[in-house]
Image (cartoon, helix red, strand yellow):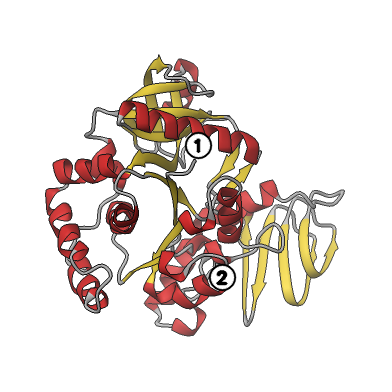
Amino acid sequence: MSNNYCLIMAGGAGTRFWPKSRIAKPKQYLSLFGDQSLIQESVKRFANFIPEESIYVVSAKSQQAVLESQTGNLPKENLIFEPVGKNTLPAIGLAALFIAEKDPEGVMIVSPSDHLIQNNELFQQCIESAALIAEKKNGIVTIGISPKYPATGYGYVQTGDEIQVGQSIRSFSVNRFVEKPNVEVAMGYLKQGGFFWNSGIFVFNVSVFLKAVQEFSPELYSDLMRIKKHIGTETYEEAVDRIYREVTSISIDYGILEKASNVFLVQGDFVWNDLGSWEEVYKYDPKKDENQNAASGEVILIDTKNSYISAPNSLVAVVGLDDVIVVQEGNTILVCKRDRAEDIKAVVGEITRRKLDQYL
C-alpha cells in the first residue's frame, strides 16, 4: 500500500467521558482498556500496514501538547491543527491539502481516533479492499459495520448492488445515508437487510475527494485553495487561523456523501464500537469479576453487581448498588446509573453554565 495515507481524526471533545475526559485531554487520549490510549491504539493499528511517515493526524490546536506527547513516533509535520472545530468535512479537507502536496494521486484512509476495533487482520483486509475500489472506481468508499442489533445511536447506510473489482471483502454500491433512527425503524432496517452501521471510516483518492468538495461544497473548496497557497510558508499559521475560522461547519456525510453518486461500501465484520459512553466501555471491558463488575484502582465492592468503577487516585467503596458507573478523577467524582450514561454530557453542560471551568 505504497501510495496510501492514513488520516486519524482526533479533534473530539468526548463530553460523555467526563470526568476523565477534559478539554486538555479528551477521550481519544485516555487509556480505557490497557496501557495505550485510544489514539495510540489507532496509530499502531494502521502502522501495521502503512508507514508511519504516511500517517497524519488532524486535531484541535488546544490539544497540541497532549497529541505531540502521545504520537512521538510520527513526524511532527504530519500533525495538523484546526484553530477551531468545524466538523469533519473541513478537517478532512485541510489534511487533504497536505497529503495532495506530497502525492496528488494518493489514497486517503480517514478514521476516527477513539473507536474500539478488534480483529486487526480482518480490519486491514477491509481497508485494502476499500482502497482497491477507490482506485478502480474513482469512488468514495465507506466501511459499513454489519449491524448486530437495532442500534439507535448510529447512522445507517443502505446499500444497492454488490460490486466486484477484485477486492477480497463483500462490497456494494450505496443507495443512501440514513440518520440515527428510532428503535422501530432500526428493527425494520435489520429485518429488511442491506443496511449497515456508518463507521465513520472512509477511503478515497485525494484528487477524487477534492473534486467532490469543489462540486458539492464550492465555498469550502475556495477557502481550502486560499489556505493551500500558504502551506510550507511562514504565513501558513496566520492564514489558516484567519481563513479556517470563516468556513462553514459541516460533516462529510452532509457535505459530500449524501450528494455524490460514486459512493461504495465495504462490509466490515470485525468487532467495532464507537465507545460513545462509559456504558460501552463497561460492556467491552474484559476484566469483569464474578459479579460482572469492572473495577480499576482502589475499589471495595460489597453487594454490588454489574457495575463499572474507576478510581485511580483514591479509595472508592460501593455498597448495595447494582448497574452503576462510578468514575473518580482528581477532585471530581461521577456516580450514575448505567442506563443514564448518555446523559453525562448534561453534567458538562451544567458545569459550563455555572462557569466551573476548573472542572472541565
- In the rendered image of this protein, does residue 271 appear above or below residue 247? above
Front-most of 118 and 204? 204
Residue 111 image point, x, y percent: 46, 48
Residue 317: give x, y in percent of width and height: 79, 70
* Label 2 with label 1: CB-CB less than 8 Å: no
Q: Is residue 162 left or right of residue 27?
A: left
For the residue labelled by badge 2, is the local secondary structure a helix, a strand or a loop?
A: loop
As helix, strand or loop, the secondary structure at mark 1 comes to helix
What amino acid does circle 2 point to?
Gly
Category of crowding for the residue at label 1, using alpha-carbon neighbours closer than 10 angstroms: few (below 14), some (14–19), many (at least 20): many
Please provide percent x and percent y for residue 60.
Answer: 39, 69
Seen at 41% across and 21% down, the residue is: 172
Category of crowding for the residue at label 2, using alpha-carbon neighbours closer than 10 angstroms: few (below 14), some (14–19), many (at least 20):
few
Residue for badge 1: 127
Image-based side of 325 in relation to 268, left or right: right
Residue at (30% x, 69% y) in the render: 84
Per the rendering, the mark at residue 285 is none
According to the picture, the residue beneath numbered tag 2 turns out to be 72
* Residue in the picture at 72% in, 51% down: 285
Quick check: 159 left or right of 127?
A: left
Could you say which quadrant of the image residue 223 lies in? bottom left
Which mark sits nearer the N-terminus, 2 or 1? Answer: 2
Task: List x then y, in percent, for residue 219.
Answer: 12, 53
Q: Is residue 191 above or below residue 82?
A: above
- Closer-to-camera residue (155/337): 155
